[in-house]
Image: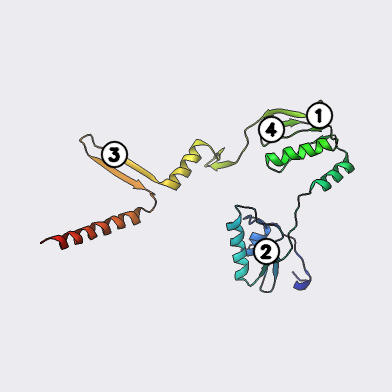
Amino acid sequence: MGLPRGKVLILSTGGQGEPRAALARIAEDQHPLSLVEGDVVLFSSRTIPGNEISIGRIQNLLAERGVKIVTDRQSMIHVSGHPGRPELEALYGWLRPDILVPVHGEMRHMLEQARLGEGCGIPDTVVQKNGDIVRLAPGVPGKLAEVRAGRLVLDGDIIVPADGDAITARRRLSRDGLVIVALDGKGGAQVHGMGLPLDEELIRAEHEHDADAQRDGSRERP
């Protein structure tokens, strides 16, 4: 940071709003690098659908400091790290690989990648997904088995799947709330609710409705 600010270009991660990436930490003033009024941040990648909120949050933090923000909407600065068919064909021609294992993409992308590789003369292609166990050698390359794959969470002192029954139930409780009905065996019941959405607003609306009904009833009396 001792260099003239107008002569420094910093290449940073975090263009998609990742919370622990360098750009997010810089925007939150949690990084050795700092940005001040007059600095410029170029978002050279296009927004991936679903990341709009996280990217907007970082851009707002930068804007509060007077940092100028430039995206592909203001200038033709978009670049892609994904090669097209001509680049891939050239790469395969240089490397002449025996095996192609497409990774980092959706299934339709990886299948198309495998078809392209076969068209370029690559002898073996292995299309895999998370959890697949793949053997490349010896013998014919291919899938051997599957293991459970996915996100894990630390629950106390144990590690459980993020999509397990317990975690799923907690998500539903946090989203929908909980209603408990207790019967006393004599025809009576007690109802308790926790975390119900807009419960205070509903109670207030009911009271207002009852009050309006009482007023309207009093007007109709002779």
- The amino acid at mark 3 is Ala
Q: Earlier in the sequence, mark 3 or mark 2?
A: 2
CB-based contact (under 8 Å), mark 4 and mark 1:
no
Q: Secondary structure at mark 2?
A: loop
Determine the residue positioned at 33% across, 41% down: 180
Q: Quadrant of residue 216?
A: bottom left
Q: Earlier in the sequence, mark 4 or mark 3?
A: 4
Look at mark 1 in the image and give the residue it sits on: 137
Position of the C terminus, as image quadrant, is bottom left
Q: Which mark is residue 182?
A: 3
Q: Secondary structure at mark 1?
A: loop
Q: Determine if residue 182 is in view.
A: yes
CB-based contact (under 8 Å), mark 2 and mark 4:
no
Position of the N terminus, as image quadrant, is bottom right
Mark 2 crowdedness (10 Å alpha carbons): few <14, some 14-19, many ≥20: few
Q: Which mark is residue 73?
A: 2
Determine the residue positioned at 75% across, 72% down: 5
Q: Earlier in the sequence, mark 1 or mark 3?
A: 1
* Residue 219 horizontal/vertical position (percent): 16, 63
Q: What distance separates the C-alpha of mark 1 from that of mark 3?
A: 63 Å
* Residue 36 horizontal/vertical position (percent): 67, 72
Q: Earlier in the sequence, mark 2 or mark 4?
A: 2
Look at mark 4 in the image and give the residue it sits on: 132
15 and 12: which is toward the camera: 15
- The amino acid at mark 4 is Asp
Q: Secondary structure at mark 4?
A: strand
113 to the left or right of 46: right
Determine the residue positioned at 25% across, 40% down: 189
1 and 157: which is toward the camera: 1
